[in-house]
Amino acid sequence: MTWVKICGITNLEDAWAAVEAGADALGFVFYPNSPRYVDPKAARSIVEALPASIEKIGVFVDEAPEALAGIAQRVGLTGLQLHLELSRIQQEPRSLVPLNGVKQYVALRVHGLLHSESLVPLGIELDGIVLDSGTLLEPGGTGKAFDWERSRFWVGRIKQMANVVVAGGLTPANVRRAMRILEPWGVDVASGVEARPGKKDPEKVRAFIAAVRDTDPKIP
């Protein structure tokens, strides 16, 4: 089944709505400039109340490895999602430092990939690469979808490096199309299931996950 992450969780009510709807992972944004920012102390209180089976992923932008380790330990995160530029990853492989027992995902801007002449191995084993429509000013959470058709070739190349997670502008209405075009390992949504920035709409969350499950290949 397609892996589903509901990102931008800021409160326990929204977290449980996502869990009960069938999410595989929840995302907690630790980027201060985001309207979905959550304080590590508040995130810890949410994480402690959730089932162990749910992935709890911290979302970071250009954070130092030592800071990542500290927050991951304090909050009880099971995964990290790092928003980094492809050029930096290629030039500074040490910017990706895995932590024991903690999954690691890297988020890349599709715009940058479409203007890259080549893709090289990242030099580290990742649990997934999140493809988003972010910009230099807005690393993610823009609510805008990238061009899935135009990106199909690059997505195929990236699948050779790691599991691909599609993000950016997904909604209950369009996630089926994104899945059919790109056939990702996972999907990641934030603004597409919100009532307002930082507050989820339970009906949209349920509708999104139902759409994903309806599109998943049926097991005979």
Image (cartoon, helix red, strand yellow):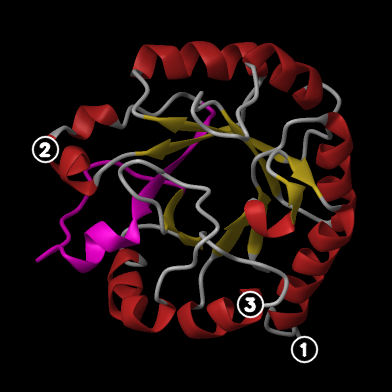
In primary-sequence order, the first of circles 3 and 2 is 2
Categorize mark 3 by other alpha carbons within 10 Å: few (<14), some (14-19), many (20+).
Answer: some
Q: Which residues are magenta?
A: 101-127
Query: In the rendered view of the protein, which quadrant contains the N terminus?
Result: bottom right
| Residue type (three-letter) at the residue carrying disc 1 | Pro
Query: Which residue is rendered at x = 89% and y = 36% of the image?
Result: 13
Judge left or right: residue 118 versus residue 128: left
**Direction bottom: furthest residue:** 220
Categorize mark 2 by other alpha carbons within 10 Å: few (<14), some (14-19), many (20+).
Answer: few
**Image vertical order of residue 39 relative to residue 207, above or below:** above
**Image vertical order of residue 51 relative to residue 72, above or below:** below
**Image vertical order of residue 170 relative to residue 19, above or below:** below
Query: In the rendered view of the protein, which quadrant contains the C terminus?
Result: bottom right
In primary-sequence order, the first of circles 3 and 1 is 3
Indicate the secondary structure of the residue bearing disc 3: loop
Residue for badge 1 = 220
- Tell me if label 3 and label 2 are in contact, CB under 8 Å: no
Judge left or right: residue 194 versus residue 109: right
Rendering coords of residue 80 (x, y %): 50, 33
Query: Which residue is rendered at x = 28% and y = 72% of the image?
Result: 154
Indicate the secondary structure of the residue bearing disc 2: helix
Confirm whether the magenta stretch covers residue 118. Answer: yes
State the mark number for residue 174: 3
Residue for badge 2 = 91
Query: Which residue is rendered at x = 64% and y = 17% of the image?
Result: 39
